[in-house]
Each structure stands twice: as structure tokens, then as C-alpha cells.
Amino acid sequence: MKTLRQSLPMLNAMAVFEAAARHGGLTPAAEELNIAQSAVSRHVANLERQLSVVLFTRKGNRVMLTREGNSLAIAIRNGLGTIKQAVEKLQPPDRDTLVVGCIYDLQQMWLMPRFELVASGVPNGQVMLLTSYDDRDFDQPDVAFSLRFGRPEDWPGFLAIKLFDGECFPVCSPAFLERYPTLASESYTAFRNVPLLHIVTEPGAVDSWESWISTESTLNGPRFTNYLSMMHETIAGRGAAIAWAGYIEEDLRLGRLVRLSATSRRHHNSFYVVKRKVTNSIVERVVKALLNSVELNMGN
């Protein structure tokens, strides 16, 4: 009988692969793990060789999970989550640190421009950001509050306060619009003749180009597993994308992106601050600052 170590080879490589899968790219995984991108690439390649499967398809600097890669990433994430919960139960929480949970894309694109609002409301700036795509990670006792996408009924026992609607619309860089000026017409047909960037999503989702253009055909263009990677390419002028309003407000304000339609689509879910019904004054102060920042932006 094989030992656990023999059945689960290259545990370190699996952790590196999970980070690359979660971020949808090797570079952001390297930044999270504080290692070189070449080291991430080497770990993934070694894991593929050991398992005799292809985990990512590669096109230039872009990577996409294969079906086998997606299955493995989910399994590793669930396994690491179970280990994390067990370790946290063994360790007393640092009660001087405010733990804020947030899904990864929302943290990078909406929360980080407001991080000073969080840190300034906490004594000595003792803040820890917990990122995950699994809301169950945010239910842990040490998480003061979290930012989530869904509906209040998804989080029984918690108080959910809406941040903003799940609203999306097409955007591109100013330079891209100069190359394809027909996009300014807001005609859906204009999007059929330009390079498009896609987020990997369910068929018929409001943030898919197929849904926006109202076609059942699969449209060409690179596909990404997270918005951060897709918006990086959009800002670089390599295509138009469907983006969530809250994610890109900073880029619109700074002129890195332009909105291509006055029309928007809304998801049945929205973005919320989720907290316990009874919290302390620090949590209330930080949550209020974040909510006020949304109202201020809407007022502008």
C-alpha cells in the first residue's frame, strides 16, 4: 500500500499550482508566494510531468486551466482549506488584528484603492486581508467582516449591507478606441469586428460577450479565469472587455479605461459587506468608511 506521501507527490508544487490556478496566471502567483515566476513555471511543469497530465494550456504569457487542471485545483483548494481550518482551531487568534475577508478580484480592484480607509480605522493599522473564492472561509470566528458577491439569504446568521449592484458594461482603453472608433456608436454589431477579451463564465451570463451581443456562437478571443488578468490586458489596449462597474471605477476615473455603452446589464446578485449582527466599534467604523466611499463615488 502506498503511503500518503507516495500517493500525494510534490505537495509544495501542488500549493504553487493552486495559487496559479486561483489567480489565472503565473506572475500573480509568484507575487503572492514571493518567488520568481520561473519557479512557479518549474513547479507546475514538474507537477504535470509527475502526474502525466496537462494542467494549463499556454498562449504566450497567458495560461488557462484544462479540465484536469480545474479538477485538481478544486481538490487542492478544498484540502488546503480543511487543513487551514484545523490549524486555526489549534492557534489562538491575534485579537489585535482586524481580519477582513474578500474574494480575490474584488480585493485587488475595489478594496485595495480604499485600503487606507481600513487601516486608518484600526489601532496601529493591524489589518490582515484574507482572500478566498470560498465564502465558508469568511465564516470563521476570527474574520471581523467580509466583502462578498451574492444575496443576503446566502449568509444566514450574518448581517449583509449592500455595497453596490452587480452591474457590468463594455470597456476598452482610450488607445483601443482610437483604433476602433466604431465602438463609440454603441452598436452591438461593432463589437463583432474587434478583438474581444473574455472572462470564463457560465453560458448566458451577463458578463459574457455572447450574452451582450446576443449570439449563441462562441466568439473568438483569449479567456481568463479572473478579472484582474483580463483588465490588465484591456488597459494595455489588447481588446475590449465586459467589466463589473465596481471593479473598474478607479480605472475609469484615472482615464485608463473608457466606457463603451450607456447601457448596462445587472446580475441578480450584488456586492455586500457581510458582518456579524453584534460587532465592536472598530468594525463599525471601518464598515461605515467603506460604505461612505461608495456613496461619495456615486455622488460624483
Image (cartoon, rainbow, N blue to C red):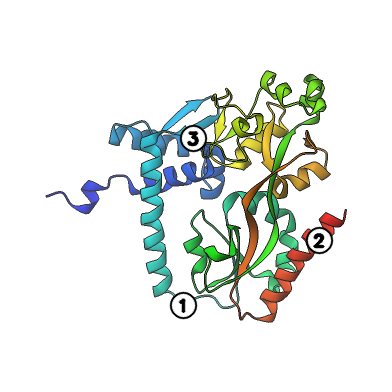
Residue type, label 2: Glu
Q: To which residue does mark 3 refer?
A: 38
**Quick check: marks 2 and 3 in contact, CB under 8 Å?**
no
Q: Decide which of 281, 217 is in the foreground and name it.
A: 217
Q: Earlier in the sequence, mark 1 or mark 3?
A: 3
Where does the image place residue 108, in percent across and percent down from the top left?
A: 65, 50
Q: Is residue 67 visible?
A: yes
Q: Which is in the foreground here, disc 1 or disc 3?
A: 1
Q: To which residue does mark 2 refer?
A: 295
Q: Is residue 84 above or below residue 169?
A: below
Q: To which residue does mark 1 refer?
A: 92
Residue type, label 3: Ser
Where does the image place residue 54, in percent across and percent down from the top left?
A: 36, 31
Answer few, some or many: residues within 10 Å of disc 1's Cα (few below 14, many 20 plus, some between 14 and 19): few
SS for tag 2? helix
Answer few, some or many: residues within 10 Å of disc 3's Cα (few below 14, many 20 plus, some between 14 and 19): few
Who's the residue at 51% across and 49% down the image? 33
Q: Is residue 233 above or below residue 228?
A: above
Who's the residue at 57% across and 27% down the image? 222
Residue type, label 1: Pro
SS for tag 3? helix
Q: Decide which of 241, 25 is in the foreground and name it.
A: 241
Q: Earlier in the sequence, mark 2 or mark 1?
A: 1
Who's the residue at 41% across and 63% down the image? 84
> Is residue 265 rendered to the left or right of residue 136?
right
Q: Earlier in the sequence, mark 2 or mark 3?
A: 3
Where does the image place residue 112, in percent across and percent down from the top left?
A: 69, 54
Where does the image place residue 37, in percent across and percent down from the top left?
A: 52, 37
**Quick check: marks 2 and 1 in contact, CB under 8 Å?**
no
Answer few, some or many: residues within 10 Å of disc 2's Cα (few below 14, many 20 plus, some between 14 and 19): few
